[in-house]
Amino acid sequence: MYTIAALLVMAIALGGVMAILNSIIETAGLTAIRNLPVIGGHLDAAAAVGLVWLLDIHLVATFTGGMRNEWMSWVIDGVVIYGMIPVKDAVVSAIGKGLRA
């Protein structure tokens, strides 16, 4: 249960990191990065992996029993956090609907 909550919190944090990263990209005039086929389409996932690496967290490793290499854990955790964004949006929407009722 705590792992799911931690993944949701990390998805919220990723939203904040992406807002800052997008602001920096626009301010620096590097908007062409978004048009690159591989980098621009996966910049959010790369930011999630970087966030996991920077914070040195291992959320999914508790389920898998560890990875062969530490970088695999960072990539898997980052991709899972990136995948939790729709779940986070659904949870926030459900909480908002519950508060309005």
Image (tube, grey):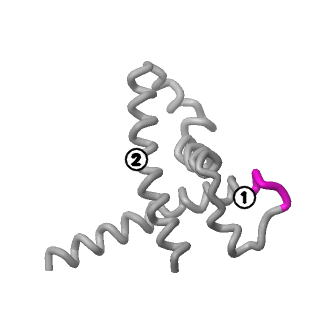
Q: Residue furthest front?
A: 56
Image: 78 above or below 27: below
What element does badge 2 sit on? Answer: helix
Picture quadrant where residue 58 is located: bottom right
Q: Given the image, on which type of amino acid does mark 1 rest?
A: Ser
> Residue 69, position in %: x, y?
83, 55
Q: Quadrant of the C terminus?
A: bottom left
Q: Determine whether, in the image, residue 42 is placed left or right of residue 87.
A: right
Q: Residue furthest top?
A: 29
Pointer 2 residue: 16
Dot 2: few (<14), some (14–19), or many (≥20) neighbours within 10 Å?
A: few
Please give the label number shown on residue 22: none
Image: 56 above or below 94: above
Mark 1–mark 2 distance (CA, rounded to whole Å) = 22 Å
Is any part of residue 66 visible from this angle? yes
Picture quadrant where residue 72 is located: bottom right
Please give the label number shown on residue 73: 1
Q: Residue at x 47, y 51 (%)?
A: 14
Q: Earlier in the sequence, mark 1 or mark 2?
A: 2
Q: Residue furthest right?
A: 68
Q: Given the image, on which type of amino acid does mark 2 rest?
A: Gly
> Residue 59, position in %: x, y?
62, 66
Q: Which residues are magenta?
A: 68-72
Dot 1: few (<14), some (14–19), or many (≥20) neighbours within 10 Å?
A: many
What element does badge 1 sit on? Answer: helix
Q: Residue at x 40, y 47 (%)?
A: 16
Q: Residue at x 76, y 51 (%)?
A: 71
Picture quadrant where residue 81 is located: bottom right
As for residue 18 lying within the magenta part, the answer is no
> Residue 11, position in %: x, y?
47, 58
Q: Nearer the viewer, residue 63 or 79?
A: 63
> Residue 2, position in %: x, y?
52, 76
